[in-house]
Amino acid sequence: MMQRIGEKISVIARFRGAGFEPSMFKWEGRPHKVKSVNGRWAEHDGQFNIYHFAVVSDTDVFYEISFHTREMAWVLDKFMIDEP
């Protein structure tokens, strides 16, 4: 089940040519290394863009994070939680 978060986070990103992707982020005081980027897409926010990334951390947790060009900020949108 995906849990919605919507919190700003700190991100270290890798830039390659005209593209970029997150390589590590910090949430709740802990670093989370990105093991893989499984999806990426963009949407418009007026004249600005929001770049979304579906990632898996080095602890095998799925996250959705996004970069908002209006605020120049990264946001943790969702993460996968285990259901009992």
Image (cartoon, grey):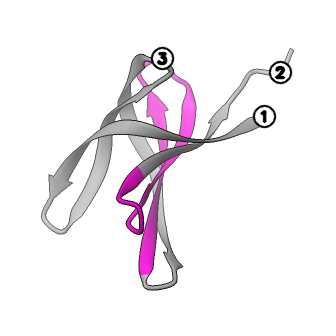
Image quadrant where one finds the N terminus:
top right
Task: Report helix, strand or loop for mark 1.
Answer: loop
Q: Which residue is mark 3?
A: 59
Q: Main secondary structure of the magenta part?
A: strand
Question: Which picture quadrant has residue 35?
Answer: top left
Residue at x-position 83% and y-position 21%? 83
For the residues labelled 2 and 1, say whether their Cβ atoms are less than 8 Å apart: yes
Which numbered marker is on residue 47?
none
Q: CA distance from mark 2 to mark 1?
A: 7 Å
Locate residue 77, reporting x and y percent: 59, 46
User: Seen in the image, is 78 located left or right of residue 47?
Assistant: right
Q: In this rendering, is residue 50 above or below 47?
A: above
For the residues labelled 3 and 2, say whether their Cβ atoms are less than 8 Å apart: no
Task: Report helix, strand or loop for mark 2.
Answer: loop
Q: Earlier in the sequence, mark 3 or mark 2?
A: 3
Q: Earlier in the sequence, mark 3 or mark 1?
A: 1
Q: Circle 3: is it few (<14), some (14-19), or many (20+) Cα within 10 Å?
A: few
Task: Report helix, strand or loop for mark 3.
Answer: loop
Locate residue 21, reporting x and y percent: 30, 50
Q: Which residue is mark 1?
A: 1
